[in-house]
Amino acid sequence: MTVVANPPAIASPCNKICTIGTDSGLCIGCGRSLAEIANWIAFCDGKRSRIMAELPRRLESLRASVDHAKQA
């Protein structure tokens, strides 16, 4: 059995589409706020995990806003 003393940290969700939405204040690529992006490396794994869990909902909301704006 292999024991890992220090499991790897949670990777950044950055996908190199770095544009902050003016209405939402969230990156349209990864769904994080500027504060979350700036502090990512300082956050503990628990906080990063919580943020990662929220990202799919945030990104869906951002996409819905864009789709709504296109229809207007």
Image (cartoon, rainbow, N blue to C red):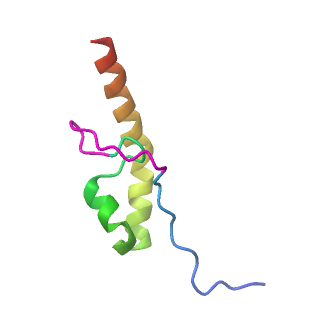
Residue 36 position, x and y percent, is 31, 60
Q: Between residue 12 and residue 64, name the one nearer to us.
A: 12
Please determine whether, in this image, residue 44 is positioned above or below residue 18: below
Please determine whether, in this image, residue 71 is positioned above or below residue 36: above
Residue 10 position, x and y percent, is 51, 67
The span shown in magenta is: 15-26
Residue 24 position, x and y percent, is 24, 39
Check the image and name the residue furthest to the right: 1
Q: Which residue is pictured at 21% across the width and 36% down the height?
A: 23
Q: Which residue is pictured at 39% across the width and 49% down the height?
A: 54
Q: Please tell me in which quadrant of the rendered image residue 47 appears.
A: bottom left
Q: Between residue 6 and residue 22, name the one nearer to us.
A: 22
Q: Please tell me in which quadrant of the rendered image residue 65 appears.
A: top left
Q: Is 31 part of what is drawn in magenta?
A: no
Q: Main secondary structure of the magenta part?
A: loop
Q: Is 23 part of what is drawn in magenta?
A: yes
Q: Please tell me in which quadrant of the rendered image residue 58 appears.
A: top left
How many numbered circles are shown? 0
Check the image and name the residue furthest to the top: 72
Quadrant where the N terminus lies? bottom right
Please determine whether, in this image, residue 37 is positioned above or below residue 16: below
Q: Which residue is pictured at 26% across the width and 60% down the height?
A: 35
Quadrant where the C terminus lies? top left
Q: Which residue is pictured at 43% across the width and 45% down the height?
A: 17
Residue 50 position, x and y percent, is 40, 59
